[in-house]
Image (spheres, grey):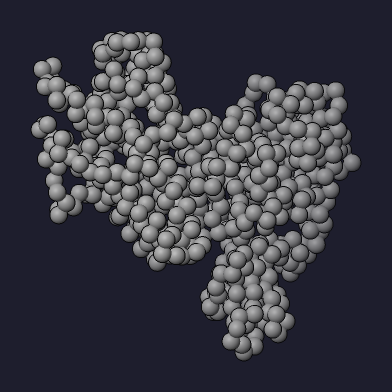
Amino acid sequence: MTLSPQWLEQLRSRITLSTLIGRTVKVQKAGREYKACCPFHNEKTPSFTINDEKGFYHCFGCGAHGDAISWMTEQRGLGFMDAVKDLAAEAQMDVPAPDPRAAQRQEVRATLHDVMAAAQDWFVTQFNGIEGAAARDYLKNRGISEKTIHEFGFGFAPDSRGRLKEALSVHGVDQLIEAGLLIKVDDKEPYDRFRGRLMIPIRDPRGRVIAFGGRILGDGEPKYLNSPDTPLFDKGRTLYNLDKASPASRKTGRILVVEGYMDAIALAQAGFADVVAPLGTALTENQIERIWKMVEAPILCFDGDSAGQKAAMRAALRALPILRPAHSLNFIALPAGQDPDDLIRSDGAHAFAALIEKPQMLDEKIWQVEYAAEPLNTPEAKAGLKKRLADHVTAIADQDIARHYRQAFDERYQEAFFARKDNRPQRQNFQNSNRKFPSKFVSYTPMDDTKSFLLEGYDLQIAKGILGGLIRHPNRISGHFEELSAFKLADSQLQALLGELINIAMTKETLDMQGLLTILEKTDCYNVAKGLLRADALNFTFNRKLPDDAPSLLIERAHRDLAEAIKVVTARPGLEAALAEATRRVQDDLTEESYAEQQRLRKAKQLFHERLVDLTQIDDTV
């Protein structure tokens, strides 16, 4: 039996060494590595280190050094082949069967690297030639610099069925087919796979080209075409830009995950070198495991459209069964309809940097998506939410983590639906409500474009109620132009409706609900507006239908509640940011002052939530 160096390297890469060693030795996190008391000699102070990213352990006391295989042979006492078989079973890899042709196949594999290198050189030559003008123009229009073009090795595949085959004929047709460069169908003549496309080389962690991605120039489908799986390339295990992102992440302690190569390239050009991307599929369990070897909580930065958010949720659900202590996923939500490249072009790299400074945790992401999945205006719908969350918890294999998730979801559920305590004074009427809010956060400071904030999740549900209130009371819009202009709603249809409301109010001095709806009827926002009037948003006092003869005090109360809801939602980002900063200070340096400030802000946050709950308690008394 011949086990090639490449096969053994792949086996080692699929094993998380700290997990393997941690089954028999107590290990603890120490920065980017793990430490333990050395199992090869007696010691009281840990000098045994484990580096998952590099795949080795080392003892600074006795000099013991090795990888996953040597751990199994030297510490567990297994023979080499038994160690390999045990590790292969864990990594779900088949051990090569005895085969006299194994050496020959390994030689072929090595030759495929030569084939891919030759193809890359040829694509680059075409890119720089006359035929590559369209590809160069495309990158120029996307703002890709000459330096980035060179660093990422962009190429061009001419629109021909045989140019590449002819240019690389010295390597043989069979090798070109096995490398995924030619397509062979039945008994037909093999032809070039990539035609009329901008070519993007995909590299392994050592920087060798193992596959290509091709973007169509002009009309045609598919828009992006990847190499098929080959002896060099496994799409579900490979991450684009890993060769550059891995060393960059050692400096930043961070990995960003985006949807595709062009997003990764745009971010890298903007200074975010620690970025990777899956290859035309949702993030797989194997890719998540590979990223976890570099960082414990990568940040997923998927597009702000519905497809991007669905991809983020798929990644979240795929991570649940394989969660382990200290390892998770973080998320950022890009503005609706934007990808990272769009955001950087429109608002600059600092806008993206600000987003990744405040990522959303995995449990928060799942709660947000499930909470917003459907209107929660009936007991049955609320019970449905609870069941979906419970189903997600059952998917978590680690029972300790599952218990924490169950508790986190239960707390959010209680806060959302049962926040009023029995011993809290019930609301009597609006004039007697004298709840105090921290003026530091309730008072509104006009925001410029850089201070606008995204409303999503629970805040988005509240925003739906506010929009419904503005439709019922359109004469209140003009009094809140500045606050409303700062809103950026995660739902693109709601954002479009908000823009229409502001524009209409700016051109009409007097406006009632029916007049507003007549104007909206001529836009794409009419159905959205009518839906909000059906009270499928939160049931605030101001988005209720009032009788024609409603007393003026009831109308004034609705107006005051609407103004307060806008203030609360506008102030929440500042409060959240202040609380996050206070929590960071407590973690960095716990003092009486820092702890008191953190507790004060927590209480302020609770008061905000209680006031919103009050606003949803419909009461006909005034």
- Residue 163: image quadrant is top right
Give the percent coordinates (x, y) of residue 536. Answer: 26, 31
Give the percent coordinates (x, y) of residue 493. Answer: 41, 25
Q: Nearer the viewer, residue 611 or 170?
A: 611
On the question of residue 440 being in view, the answer is yes
Q: Nearer the viewer, residue 615 or 63?
A: 615
Which residue: 27% across, 29% down?
Answer: 562
Give the percent coordinates (x, y) of residue 190. Answer: 76, 34
Looking at the image, is 136 positioned above or below residue 212?
A: above
Residue at the outermost bottom position: 42
On the question of residue 387 being in view, the answer is no
Residue at the outermost right position: 170
Q: Nearer the viewer, residue 542 or 510?
A: 510
The C terminus sits in image quarter? top left
Looking at the image, is 33 positioned above or below residue 501?
A: below
**Left or right of 350 on screen, residue 549:** left
- Residue 37: image quadrant is bottom right
**Left or right of 170 on screen, residue 567:** left
**Left or right of 281 on screen, residue 510:** left
Which residue: 70% across, 29% down?
Answer: 143
Which residue: 75% across, 40% down?
Answer: 152
Give the percent coordinates (x, y) of residue 507. Answer: 39, 10
Looking at the image, is 449 positioned above or below residue 366?
A: above
Which residue: 70% across, 24% down?
Answer: 141
Q: How many marks?
A: 0
The N terminus sits in image quarter? bottom right
Looking at the image, is 536 positioned above or below residue 47?
A: above
